Amino acid sequence: MFTAEFIIGADVHDAIIRPYGGDFLVVILLYCFIKSFINTPVLKTAGAVLLVAYLVEVSQYFNLLNVLVLANSTLARVLLGTCFSFTDLLAYTLGIILVLFVENVRYSVKSF
């Protein structure tokens, strides 16, 4: 999943996958990363990941990189982004909804 994110960020320059696919996948990647190291409750983890994604997006709205004098830092620009978008919030939300759906199916199958 990290490889897909990297390829999207580095090589994809279209009007759909680059702006929306990466945002959709990044919350799934973060959720899976956390769950691979820590056995945390599904809803709390998904909620925390979504909250962090929202906070990063809101930081873009308030130009946090400029406030922190990091606007020229490539790493900071890649990690925090530079442009606020309501559609990014939607992509994050849809990514977490998919996570919750998959986790629900996974736990339902285990109970058989």
Image: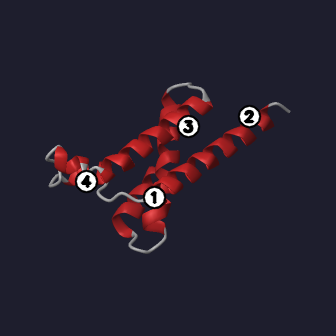
Q: Quadrant of the C terminus?
A: top right
Name, please, the residue furthest toward the bottom: 14
Q: Are marks 4 and 1 in contact (CB under 8 Å)?
A: no
Sequence-first tag of 3 and 2: 3
- Helix, strand or loop under label 4: helix
Instruction: State whether residue 110 is above or below residue 24.
Output: above
Which one is in front, 10 or 58? 58
Which numbered dot is residue 46? 3
Mark 3 vs mark 2: in front: 3
Mark 1 vs mark 2: in front: 1
Relative placement, left or right, of 65 versus 27 is: left
Q: Are marks 3 and 2 in contact (CB under 8 Å)?
A: no
CA separation, marks 3 and 2?
A: 15 Å
Which numbered dot is residue 107? 2
Would you name the residue on which mark 4 appears?
A: 77
Instruction: State whether residue 52 is above or below residue 82.
Output: above
Would you name the residue on which mark 1 appears?
A: 86
- Helix, strand or loop under label 2: helix
Which residue is found at the position 48% from the left and 67% from the top? 17
Which one is in front, 3 or 68? 68
Residue type (three-letter) at the residue carrying disc 1: Phe
Crowding around mark 4 (Cα neighbors within 10 Å: few <14, some 14 to 19, many 20+) is some
Instruction: State whether residue 47 is above or below residue 24.
Output: above
CA separation, marks 3 and 4?
A: 24 Å
